[in-house]
Amino acid sequence: MAEFGIPQISTGDLLRENIAKGTELGKAARSLMDQGQLVSDNLVNEMVAARLKQPDVVRGYVLDGFPRTLNQAEWVDAQLAGGSQALPLVAISIIVGYDELLRRITGRRLCPAGHIYNIYTNPPKVEGKCDADGQALIQRSDDSEPVFHERMKTFQEQTAPVIEHYCRQGRFEEIDGKGSVEEVTAAITSALRRLRERGKR
Ligand code: AMP
């Protein structure tokens, strides 16, 4: 976001905001999310369509956690092809091994203001409290080990075909996610810079 001055649009964050506000969408999404299942394509696509009407997207944006099914990918491709700016969409997949991913997800703790910790790799100075503002840290209800395994199954079944879809079209980049936050950030930004240059030609 900082490097390119564009917003990040995370469908997971948007769904969690809906849950917090108690909207109809939030009510429909909550139990599916807690079971590691996907929210229905129509609901998620509509939510993304509404977000893409906001003015901050004109210079581009990063979609995070979307598209997650072939249906969502086809929907977003059609939206972008029909739009006035015909934005090129490239999918980026960050590759992390199963056990490392389990540690990152089950170890994740969040401050309500957005600071993110990991109890194994980046713990707060005082257990359970944010270093920046002292607020109590929380754990996402779907960041438990049993739900993690379900989320991975869902990924294999429904999201792996999305990777195939973008691979076939040469619109796919794989990033090694093993390293530190700084290393992975550098790998993503350099891939994006390269893709942007390619897009200009
Ligand atoms: P995330 O914050 O990306 O880990 O997403 C958390 C949960 O929100 C997922 O496990 C799904 O239940 C739901 N979710 C997020 N994005 C999508 C999407 N694109 N399609 C369907 N469900 C989604």
Image: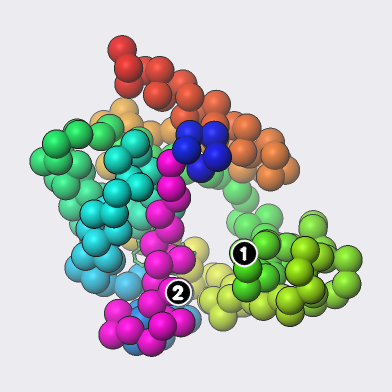
- Under mark 1, the amino acid is Gly
Identity of the residue drawn at 54% across and 34% down: 3
How far across and how far down the image is residue 74, in percent? 19, 49
How far across and how far down the image is residue 49, in percent? 22, 58
Question: Along the line of sight, which residue is nearer the eye, 130 or 65?
Answer: 130
- Seen as rendered, the residue at the extreme left is 82
Disc 2 to disc 1, C-alpha distance: 13 Å
Residue 164 shows in the view: no
Question: Which element is circle 2 on?
Answer: helix
For ligand 1, give the image quadrant: bottom left
> Alpha-carbon neighbours of circle 1 within 10 Å: few (<14), some, or many (≥20)?
few
Identity of the residue drawn at 62% across and 32% down: 186
| Residue wearing tag 2 | 16
- Magenta portion: prevailing SS class: helix
Identity of the residue drawn at 48% across and 34% down: 4
Would you place residue 60 above or below residue 145 in this image? above
Question: Which label's residue is closer to the chain start, 2 or 1?
Answer: 2
Would you place residue 179 above or below residue 153 in this image? above
Locate the C terminus by quadrant: top left
> Alpha-carbon neighbours of circle 2 within 10 Å: few (<14), some, or many (≥20)?
some
Question: Along the line of sight, which residue is nearer the eye, 115 or 42?
Answer: 115
What's the mark number on residue 114? 1
User: Which numbered mark, 2 or 1, is in the foreground of this view?
Assistant: 1
Q: Is mark 2 within 8 Å of ligand 1?
A: yes
Residue 21 shows in the view: yes
Which range is magenta?
A: 6-25
Total residue callouts: 2
